[in-house]
Image: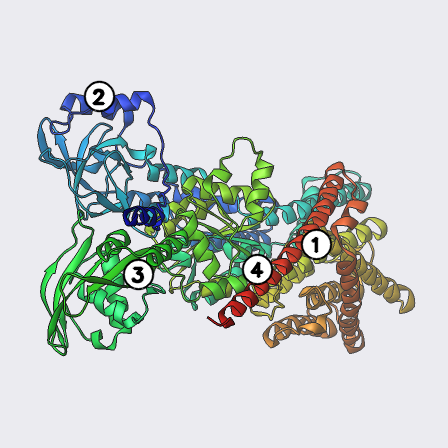
């Protein structure tokens, strides 16, 4: 009867749960599989190597070099650049050498700023190439020899040992270089490739990947893939095919296209009109007449074109890059400074980015009567001195930090204790043991540290400890058991507890995520590590745990739209490979989102390159650093928040300038188009150039202006920008005509219509009055365009205010007193009045701007431009809002019910504890 009860008890004993390590695996095609049948200790013959080299190529990553000259010339492309270049050519044709020099200088300056700031010969492929092993030991013609890794071919037999960088993807054979079976499996660090935080055990038949590092053991392997076909090679290929136009360049081109269309349309009409008028005046057009008209139109074109737009924006971004550099954030691609302001989703690698990529002691399981210090002391006694194993290092580091007795210890020299004998780790026994003399107690005892299953068996079984280890494993923590002998014996073991180990979050990761989400940036974890580990880390970082595995990205039954929705609503993805990370970024971008990506490994490089803004963290690999747009030099992620704040300030300055400059161009073109055609009135060419150069030079200081930082990701909203610019431009045109008519009809100032500059009968005062109005009124508008609200909500900086006012005060003085061959004196009354009117008028424009911003919505744009696509998009948007609201309501209800159940259970447990026994 007693034997039966014992058997029943044994049947009910807790069992350790097996947690399968999920790893990416792929089957070799039959034609490659046939090449894997190489005799291990003989290897390939020279003839076979030559045939396979010709078929598969060298074991290296091919690269494409960018011609520096072509790269420099690429900065002369774009809508605005083409218009400026046309003006440059025309100024040479009409021999207007002053304009020719100014325009040419601006073109070169724009190109140089972009080339110098952004120039970075794309070293991503070089960096990937540099991670490959340079030399390999390989069997060829029956001899073990050392060759260049680039000469490896599929079917080669390579020897892998401790410390080696794996030279190519290969399949382990389970034998050593002498042909005998190996006793110890390999431990391989592939964190830079897959994002796994712990070394992975590799046994016979498993695949080891190129560029991973052997941390334990030695074994022969047969090469399966080389060069671009390897795991790392496919990552390199993804980087090389990712060469899309940047978001900012698209925005500038859209603005440029609008300005080019209206400028060319109006200028061509004016050119034709002036030619016809000149023909009526002289009966026959000569070459000189055509050139004179062309020169007048050219000057108008140059004055209207925002030649300073690229320069002002480049300088603004360069100033921002310098500010970030002071915070140890290096900007490699200048436009990334602007694009970071619009990032609404930040995908982040886990290992080494959100976490330290260092195994660390976590909260342990302790048996009654023992403390954490006891656990660490005994585990230290059972540790191997000087071992380079990450688990041993984690245990010893924690013990020295948390046990005062061990703070200054080296090796096994511990005050009050002496290690009499030590048995190092053996793969067969899976534990370490030490016999220790306790000088204080005057007795000896034994300690053991090893796999939980082994230690629990050593102490005769422990269901509670088994359950504790299973709970740790379900959370992705690695456990180690620690035991010692009962005082007075050397054979009767008792359990001290279980050490738990985890790659912990960086100290500032949780706070960075919280602040990002406060600013409207959703953070998603994308990692190659195991799903359970990803969920545990997500919970510790305060993220939701809705993390999916890679299968959800490769579902053959799902459409791209459905996969994109999955990416949008998931909190992250685990067990992914570089292609999956790249795909996540691509799918999110397909939803119209600007996506940021942070990472540190080779596996992150393709996604870093694909993202709108790629951010490589401190201590990253060369591949990640080269593929990224921004590199963090300081440990941690807190500087990402600094980057977002700085980029949003820069964005506000750039949008402010763009709105001001488009408004000025619209005003300039409409006013001179109408006044030239309707009243035959023209302004002196030098004054037009004076307005353009002086005002653009002054606005360069916008790069140091105060900025109102948005709490949400910024967007350009080109439709809104252009519509508001046209409205403000029309209001400014109305003011200019009001000044013209009041001066002519109320104060009887001659308009000099149809008179040339050299005409002695020309009065000249109207020209000066219009010059001062056209110079000051649009220029003061920049005080309004600085922000979406009223101008007084965030006052401009003193430097910015002084620069803007100084240019217009200068314009006022040359108008009041006059300058020979430039302006005619109009007196203090006109000068001061015109400047005061321009200052007051910007307040009116400010109210108009605020009104437009407040009524503007996507629904309004659909009413104004009711295209089928826009109507469909609005319908989907409304449906999505209804669904989101329903989901929020249901989630709130579930949380409320969960809290009630949790509270009820807590009360029930408390009641049971209080019952008398």
Residue 316 x, y percent position in the rendering:
54, 62
Mark 4 to mark 2 CA distance (whole Å): 58 Å
Q: Earlier in the sequence, mark 4 or mark 2?
A: 2
| Numbered disc in front, either 3 or 4 | 3
Residue 562 x, y percent position in the rendering:
59, 38
Mark 4 to mark 1 CA distance (whole Å): 18 Å
Asked if one can make out residue 643 in the rendered structure from this viewpoint, the answer is no
Kindly identify which residue carries mark 4.
312
Using the image, tell me which numbered label, if any, was put on residue 51: 2
Kindly identify which residue carries mark 1.
721
Residue 296 x, y percent position in the rendering:
70, 50
Q: Earlier in the sequence, mark 2 or mark 1?
A: 2
Q: Is residue 776 above or below residue 110?
A: below
Q: Residues within 10 Å of mark 3 (few under 14, many from 20)?
A: many
| Numbered disc in front, either 1 or 3 | 3
Q: Earlier in the sequence, mark 1 or mark 3?
A: 3
Front in this rendered view, residue 241 or 567: 567
Residue 423 x, y percent position in the rendering:
12, 57
Mark 2 to mark 1 CA distance (whole Å): 62 Å
| Numbered disc in front, either 4 or 1 | 1
**Helix, strand or loop at disc 3?**
strand
| Numbered disc in front, either 2 or 3 | 3
Mark 1 to mark 3 CA distance (whole Å): 62 Å
Asked if one can make out residue 286 in the rendered structure from this viewpoint, the answer is yes
User: In the displayed structure, does residue 897 sit left or right of residue 274?
Assistant: left
User: In the displayed structure, does residue 628 sit left or right of residue 139?
Assistant: right
Q: Residues within 10 Å of mark 4 (few under 14, many from 20)?
A: many
**Helix, strand or loop at disc 2?**
helix
């Amino acid at each position: 009867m007693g034997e039966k009860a014992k058997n029943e008890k044994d049947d009910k004993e807790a069992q350790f749960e097996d947690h399968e390590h999920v790893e990416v695996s792929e089957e070799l095609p039959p034609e490659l599989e046939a090449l894997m049948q190489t005799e291990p200790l003989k290897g390939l013959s020279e003839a076979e190597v030559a045939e396979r080299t010709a078929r598969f190529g060298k074991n290296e990553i091919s690269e494409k070099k960018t011609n520096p000259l072509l790269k420099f010339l690429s900065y002369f492309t774009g809508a605005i650049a083409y218009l400026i270049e046309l003006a440059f050519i025309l100024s040479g044709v009409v021999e207007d050498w002053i304009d020719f020099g100014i325009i040419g200088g601006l073109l070169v300056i724009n190109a140089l700023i972009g080339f110098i700031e952004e120039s970075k010969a794309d070293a991503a492929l070089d960096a990937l190439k540099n991670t490959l092993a340079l030399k390999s030991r390989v069997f060829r013609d029956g001899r073990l020899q050392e060759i260049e890794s680039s000469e490896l071919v599929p079917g080669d037999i390579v020897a892998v040992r401790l410390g080696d960088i794996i030279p190519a993807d290969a399949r382990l054979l389970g034998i050593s270089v002498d042909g005998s079976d190996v006793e110890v499996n390999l431990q391989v660090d592939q964190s830079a490739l897959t994002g796994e935080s712990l070394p992975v055990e590799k046994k016979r038949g498993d695949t080891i990947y190129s560029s991973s590092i052997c941390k334990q053991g030695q074994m022969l392997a047969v090469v399966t893939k080389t060069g671009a076909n390897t795991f790392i090679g496919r990552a390199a290929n993804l980087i090389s095919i990712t060469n899309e136009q940047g978001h900012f360049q698209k925005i500038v081109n859209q603005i440029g296209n609008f300005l080019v269309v209206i400028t060319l349309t109006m200028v061509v009409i004016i050119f034709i009109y002036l030619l016809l008028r000149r023909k009526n005046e002289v009966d026959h057009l000569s070459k000189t007449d055509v050139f004179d008209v062309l020169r007048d139109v050219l000057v108008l074109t140059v004055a209207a074109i925002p030649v300073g737009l690229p320069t002002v924006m480049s300088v603004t971004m360069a100033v921002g890059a310098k500010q970030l550099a002071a915070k140890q954030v290096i900007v490699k691609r200048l436009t990334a400074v602007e694009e970071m302001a619009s990032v609404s989703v930040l995908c982040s690698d886990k290992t080494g980015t959100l976490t330290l990529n260092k195994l660390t002691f976590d909260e342990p399981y302790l048996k009654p009567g023992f403390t954490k210090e006891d656990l660490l002391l005994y585990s230290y006694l059972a540790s191997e001195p000087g071992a380079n194993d990450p688990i041993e290092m984690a245990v010893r580091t924690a013990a020295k930090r948390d046990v005062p007795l061990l703070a200054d210890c080296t090796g096994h020299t511990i005050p009050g204790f002496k290690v009499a004998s030590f048995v190092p780790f053996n793969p067969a026994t899976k534990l370490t043991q030490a016999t220790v003399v306790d000088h204080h107690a005057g007795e000896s005892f034994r300690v053991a540290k090893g796999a939980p299953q082994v230690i629990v068996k050593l102490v005769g079984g422990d269901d509670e400890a088994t359950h504790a280890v299973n709970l740790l494993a379900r959370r992705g923590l690695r456990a180690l058991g620690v035991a010692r002998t009962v005082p007075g014996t050397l054979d009767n073991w008792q359990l001290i507890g279980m050490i738990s180990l985890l790659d912990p979050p960086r100290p500032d990761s949780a706070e960075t995520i919280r602040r990002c989400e406060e600013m409207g940036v959703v953070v998603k974890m994308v990692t190659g590590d195991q799903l359970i580990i990803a969920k545990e880390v997500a919970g510790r970082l305060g993220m939701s745990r809705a993390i999916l595995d890679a299968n959800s990205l490769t579902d053959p039954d799902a459409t791209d739209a459905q996969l994109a929705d999955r990416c949008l609503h998931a909190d992250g993805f685990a067990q992914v490979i570089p292609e999956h990370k790249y795909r996540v970024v691509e799918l999110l971008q397909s939803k119209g989102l600007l996506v940021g990506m942070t990472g540190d490994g080779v596996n992150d490089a393709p996604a870093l390159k694909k993202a709108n803004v790629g951010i490589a963290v401190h201590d990253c690999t060369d591949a990640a650093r080269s593929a990224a747009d921004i590199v963090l030099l300081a440990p941690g992620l807190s500087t990402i928040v600094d980057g977002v704040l700085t980029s949003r300030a820069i964005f506000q300055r750039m949008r402010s300038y763009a709105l001001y400059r488009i408004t000025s161009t619209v005003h300039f073109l409409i006013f001179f188009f109408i006044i030239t055609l309707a009243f035959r009135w023209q302004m002196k060419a030098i004054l037009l150039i004076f307005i353009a150069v002086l005002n653009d030079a002054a606005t360069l200081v916008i790069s140091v202006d105060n900025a109102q930082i948005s709490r949400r990701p910024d967007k350009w909203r080109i439709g809104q920008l252009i519509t508001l610019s046209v409205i403000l431009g029309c209001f400014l045109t109305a003011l200019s005509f009001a000044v013209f008519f009041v001066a002519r009809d109320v104060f009887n100032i001659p308009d000099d219509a149809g008179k040339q500059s050299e005409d002695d009968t020309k009065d000249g005062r109207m020209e000066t009055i219009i010059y001062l109005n056209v110079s000051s009124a649009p220029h003061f508008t920049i005080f309004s365009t600085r922000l979406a609200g009223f101008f007084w909500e965030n006052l401009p900086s003193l430097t910015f205010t002084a620069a803007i006012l100084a240019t217009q005060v200068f314009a006022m003085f040359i108008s009041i007193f006059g300058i020979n061959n430039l302006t005619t004196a109009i007196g203090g009354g006109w000068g001061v009045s015109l400047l005061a009117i321009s200052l007051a008028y910007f307040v009116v424009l400010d109210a108009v701007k605020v009104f437009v911003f407040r009524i503007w919505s996507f629904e309004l744009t659909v009413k104004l431009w009711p295209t089928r696509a826009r109507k469909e998009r609005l319908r989907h948007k409304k449906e999505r809002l209804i669904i989101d609201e329903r989901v929020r309501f249901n989630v709130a209800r579930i949380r409320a019910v969960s809290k009630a159940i949790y509270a009820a259970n807590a009360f029930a447990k408390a009641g049971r504890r209080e019952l008398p026994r």
